[in-house]
Image (cartoon, rainbow, N blue to C red):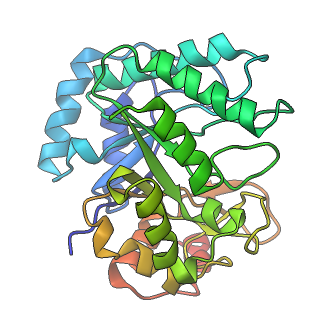
Amino acid sequence: MKLIIGSHVSFNKDTQMVGSIKEAVSYGSNTFMFYTGAPQNTNRSDIKIDLIKEADNLMKENNIDKNNIVVHAPYIINLANSEKSYDFSINFLKQEISRCEKLGINKIVLHPGSHVGLGEEAGLDNIVFALKEILKTKTNVKILLETMAGKGSELGKTIDELKYIIDNVNSDNLGVCLDTCHLNDSGIDLTNFDSYLKDFDKKIGINKIGCIHINDSLNPISSHKDRHANFGFGNIGFNTLIDIVYNPIFENVPKILETPYVTKDANSKERIYAPYKYEIEMIKGKEFDKDMIEKIRNN
């Protein structure tokens, strides 16, 4: 089975995707995900056209298919609440899609949004209205709605909520990004993942899944907390995650790690060591290394 595996990587104003690709390659990846600017603010540098060709050549040299590269929309976009920065969220997502088009990226992952007191029904309708408005403009960029943990007033935490959005927007440019940590925290038993997929296929369609975030969870099932753990070091567990990664249904779907950086020591809060090279090696070898975090610290 072909494995499309990568992680979140950086994107800075000077090297842009060239730097992103070099970082991904250093981890042993053949795909990657990035934000086109800081996820918490609106600061965005201009896309440097001259770097795009260099990036394309670099991807070809390293057997990276550009169709598998993913952009993540910033967290500050909230399409579910029409009373707080709604027009800003719509326009900012339009801008992010435009940046994807310039870069030649055709997938952008989006947190559907939080209704923040308006109620689930109103929140879902706000998301539908916003996405219809955004997708009025023709684009080859597909918006992938991320499965959410259900923290606070988050929407997109169930198949039915995602189905409501997808059915009512009714666009080929809308799909889904599964997140294993979020699924666990929302109440999905990933040891019985086939049952979830059967329900998903019946209501939405497996063909709508365009990306998978393969994260473990620091919290037990149904916690609604959304706290990621390193691959195999959380409550989901290595074998369950490996079964998802190697499910033949997802052979052509990019799998992205968003796991935590490793700290200097067990008592430190300063996250400084990227775990992705080591996690990808474990995933490729299909063998859990319980000493991985200590090895990273001591390297």
Where is residue 11? Give x, y as percent.
45, 34
Toward the viewer: 277 or 285?
285
Residue 77 seen in this snapshot: no
Which residue lies at the image location 47% right of the left edge and 39% below the top edge? 167
Toward the viewer: 158 or 249?
158
Task: Count the marks.
Answer: 0
Where is residue 130? Give x, y as percent.
57, 21
Where is residue 172? Give x, y as percent.
32, 35
Residue 184 to residue 205: above or below = below
Residue 85 found in image quarter: top right
Which residue lies at the image location 45% right of the left edge and 48% below the top edge? 176
Which residue lies at the image location 64% right of the left edge and 11% below the top edge? 87
Toward the viewer: 191 or 121?
121
Residue 236 to residue 227: above or below = below
Which residue lies at the image location 74% right of the left edge and 53% below the top edge? 150
Residue 133 seen in this snapshot: yes
Tell me the quarter of the image containing the N terminus: bottom left
Residue 90 to residue 283: above or below = above
In the picture provided, is 6 more to the left or to the right than 66?
A: right
Toward the viewer: 204 or 266?
204
In the picture provided, is 84 more to the left or to the right than 108?
A: right
Where is residue 232? Give x, y as percent.
57, 79
Residue 153 found in image quarter: top right
